[in-house]
Each structure stands twice: as structure tokens, then as C-alpha cells.
């Protein structure tokens, strides 16, 4: 996407980002990435690998470097298309860290103290409750506000951060006049919350110590089949949505998300059949959905020059667009414009 595209066509602007935290799960894919891919025609999309956010927890340098490049390659493989979309690595665009600092000074200690993610993470990692973890939502607000984004696709866990971004933007606009667009959340259609295959009361999460509870986008077909065959269901042996059938509901949701079939169609398809057939069918559908992604990923990850060309080109454009907003904000505050 060139800079001009953003200027001429008045499509709504979307911004979102994902942390390079290692494995990308079927939950991340169906709940977020698949949605990002389909938004690329109807919106001007800007997506980033949020590497600056990732150092709020300690990273091992070699592994961190691999995670960043692998996340970039995997998102390209999922269908993020740099001809339509700006897709870059957050730390390559220095305006993000700069605006984040400014926003820190317009955000109250009390506001950040109320963030449930901070409360949660600081209780779980008492040995590293760093200032970055606390100020994390201001960096996220900077990501979004720099591009004057209209919509931000995020999961429910990020809703509070998005509201903070709106509050800070509104406060800044109130003091200095209109500077930042107030972004709205964009929440994926129902069925996008994928649950653990072993405990369907919990969301599918790569931090789950039981590796059978989640499927990674890059898992081998035989591993995907095995994990679905072991998925927790119930003793009723009927494929239909039901209140006490969380495991089956989840498998039906996954199947529906991948095949586009409705709940009724799925119920009809498996009438009179047992869970064995059903689980195999879900696994096969997921395997076929992920196969081309894995193949494209193998090609991208082997071609570092191509990856570098894509993220460099996108970061250059992102810098130009975001610098306009940063300059505007700095001028309003009263900073003297420097040469760079
Ligand atoms: P963790 O597994 O450590 O809880 P995560 O998988 O939630 O982390 P994030 O980087 O926080 O990783 O999430 C990236 C995106 O994927 C977010 O938009 C989030 O809402 C979405 N997402 C994550 N897990 C699921 C899930 N099980 N179902 C649907 N969407 C999900
Ligand atoms: N905090 C988000 C990732 C993220 C993000 C953003 C999402 C960083 N910057 C801007 C939307 C908009 C997460 O951990 N899922």
C-alpha cells in the first residue's frame, strides 16, 4: 500500500498488532488473524508485530529475534498482503516509542493502576513488575492514535486498553484542540472465541501447560489429528449445540469457522454419527485450512531477503504517516521543531 492510497480513498482505517510471543495458535488465527485478512479489501489496514510490547517480559535475545521474524513470516503466510496493507515491525517505526512517552505524561497513575491486565500480570510475575508493564497501554494507545485509526480489532481482553486510548485521546484533544481520532473497537463475530480442547471452560491459550489443549497454526497434520481425537466432549454422543455441551460447542464453532457451515448444517451432517467421525472431520477441515499456510510459511521463512524488503518498505511508509500525527501533537504541546 502506498502513502497515496491512504490519502485518496476514504476507506475506514484499521490498526491492530500482535505480540511475537512464539507460537501462534488456532485461537489466534480464527479469533484474530483470519479476520484481519478478510478486512484488507474493505478497509485501509495497518498491522504490526508489537515487539516493543513484548519486552515487558524478559526475552532471551536469540529466541526473541527468531520469534519476531517468524511472526512476520507467519502473518504473511496467513494472507496479510503488503500490496494492500501496511505490515511492519513496531520497533522499526520510532514514532511509536516517542508518542508513547508523550502519552505517558497525559495519563494518570490511577488510570493505569486499574487495568486488569496489569493487576493480573503483576501478581503472576512478582519478580519483574517493571514500569513498561505498567505503561503498556500508553504504547498501545500511541500505536493506534498515530494512524488516526477508526477501528481496532481486538479480543475482549484488550477492550479496557482501547477505552484508555480513547480517554487519553479525548483528554489531549480537550486541552489542545482536535489532534487524535477517537478509535472504536471492532470485535469479531460470535464463535471466534476458541476454547481449550482439554478444558472447554477456558480459552485456548499457548501458555496452557497441557500442549494437547491447543493447536498451533504450524502443527503437523498428525499432531492436529491426535489433539482433536483427544478433545474433551461429553457422554451424549449427539453433535448439536447445547448448554452443557461446551466441548462439542467448541468443536462445532471451530468447524463452522473453518468451513463456513452453519450450526444447523453441521447438526444435519453428523446426524446419527458418533463423536469419532465428527472429531475426524473437524481435524481434517483444520488440517486443510492450515496446510497452505504452513507451506507458504516454509517458503517465506527461507527467504530472509524478501521478508526484509517487505518490512522495510512498509516501515518507511508507516514512518511518514505516523510522523504527521506526532509532529502535530508536539507542535500543539509547544515543542520547537528539530531538524529530524
Ligand atoms: P496467551 O495464550 O498467552 O493468553 P494469546 O494467545 O491470547 O496469549 P495475544 O497476543 O494476547 O495472545 O492475542 C492475540 C490475538 O488473538 C488477540 O486479538 C486475542 O484476542 C486473540 N486470541 C487469543 N486467543 C484466542 C482464542 N482462544 N480465541 C479467539 N481469539 C483469541
Ligand atoms: N496488546 C495487544 C497487542 C497490541 C495491539 C496494539 C492491539 C499492541 N498494540 C494496538 C491493537 C492495537 C495484545 O497483547 N493482544
Image: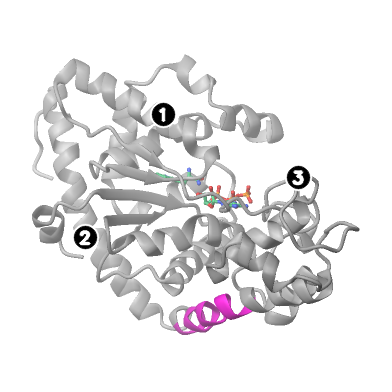
The residue where tag 2 is placed is 316
For the stretch drawn in magenta, the main secondary structure is: helix
Give the image location of residue 231, x and y in percent. 80, 63
Q: How many marks?
A: 3
**Mark 3 and mark 1: Cα distance apart in space:** 32 Å
**Mark 2 and mark 3: Cα distance apart in space:** 51 Å
Q: Which residues are magenta?
A: 287-299
Label 3: state its secondary structure.
Answer: loop
Judge the density around disc 3: few (<14), some (14-19), many (≥20) Cα neighbours within 10 Å.
few
Give the image location of residue 305, x and y in percent. 35, 79
Give the image location of residue 178, x and y in percent. 15, 26
Ligand 2 falls in quadrant: top left
The residue where tag 3 is placed is 243
User: Could you tell which of marks 3 and 1 lies nearer the N-terminus?
Assistant: 1
- Locate the C terminus and report the quarter of the image it occupies: top left
Say which of marks 2 and 3 sits in front: 3
Amino acid at each position: 500500500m502506498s502513502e497515496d492510497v491512504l490519502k485518496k480513498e476514504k476507506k475506514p482505517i484499521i490498526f491492530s498488532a500482535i505480540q511475537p510471543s512464539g507460537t501462534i495458535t488456532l485461537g489466534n488465527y480464527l479469533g484474530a488473524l483470519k479476520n484481519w485478512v478478510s478486512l484488507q479489501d474493505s478497509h485501509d489496514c495497518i498491522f504490526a508485530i508489537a515487539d516493543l510490547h513484548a519486552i515487558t517480559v524478559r526475552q532471551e535475545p536469540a529466541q526473541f529475534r527468531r520469534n519476531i521474524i517468524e511472526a512476520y513470516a507467519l502473518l504473511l503466510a496467513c494472507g496479510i498482503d503488503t500490496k494492500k496493507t501496511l505490515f511492519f515491525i513496531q520497533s522499526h517505526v520510532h514514532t511509536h516509542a516517542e508518542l508513547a512517552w508523550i502519552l505517558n505524561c497525559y495519563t494518570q497513575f490511577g488510570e493505569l493502576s486499574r487495568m486488569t491486565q496489569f493487576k493480573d500480570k503483576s501478581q503472576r510475575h512478582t519478580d519483574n513488575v517493571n514500569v513498561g508493564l505498567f505503561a503498556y497501554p500508553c504504547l498501545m494507545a500511541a500505536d493506534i492514535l498515530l494512524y488516526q485509526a477508526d477501528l481496532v480489532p481486538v479480543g475482549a481482553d484488550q477492550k479496557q486498553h482501547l477505552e484508555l486510548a480513547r480517554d487519553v485521546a479525548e483528554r489531549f484533544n480537550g486541552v489542545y484542540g482536535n489532534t487524535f481520532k477517537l478509535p472504536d473497537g471492532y470485535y469479531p463475530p460470535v464463535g471466534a472465541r476458541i476454547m481449550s480442547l482439554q478444558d472447554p471452560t477456558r480459552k485456548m491459550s499457548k501458555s496452557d501447560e497441557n500442549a494437547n489443549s491447543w493447536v498451533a497454526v504450524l502443527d503437523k497434520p498428525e499432531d492436529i489429528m491426535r489433539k482433536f481425537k483427544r478433545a474433551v466432549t461429553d457422554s451424549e454422543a449427539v453433535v448439536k449445540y447445547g448448554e452443557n455441551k461446551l466441548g462439542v460447542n467448541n468443536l462445532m464453532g471451530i468447524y463452522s469457522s473453518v468451513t463456513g457451515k452453519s450450526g444447523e448444517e453441521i447438526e444435519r451432517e453428523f446426524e446419527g454419527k458418533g463423536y469419532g467421525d465428527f472429531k475426524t472431520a473437524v481435524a481434517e477441515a483444520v488440517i486443510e485450512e492450515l496446510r497452505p499456510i504452513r507451506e507458504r510459511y516454509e517458503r517465506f521463512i527461507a527467504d530472509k531477503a524478501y521478508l526484509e524488503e517487505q518490512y522495510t518498505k512498509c516501515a518507511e511508509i508507516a514512518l511518514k504517516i505516523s510522523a504527521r500525527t506526532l509532529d502535530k501533537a508536539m507542535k500543539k504541546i509547544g515543542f520547537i521543531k528539530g531538524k529530524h
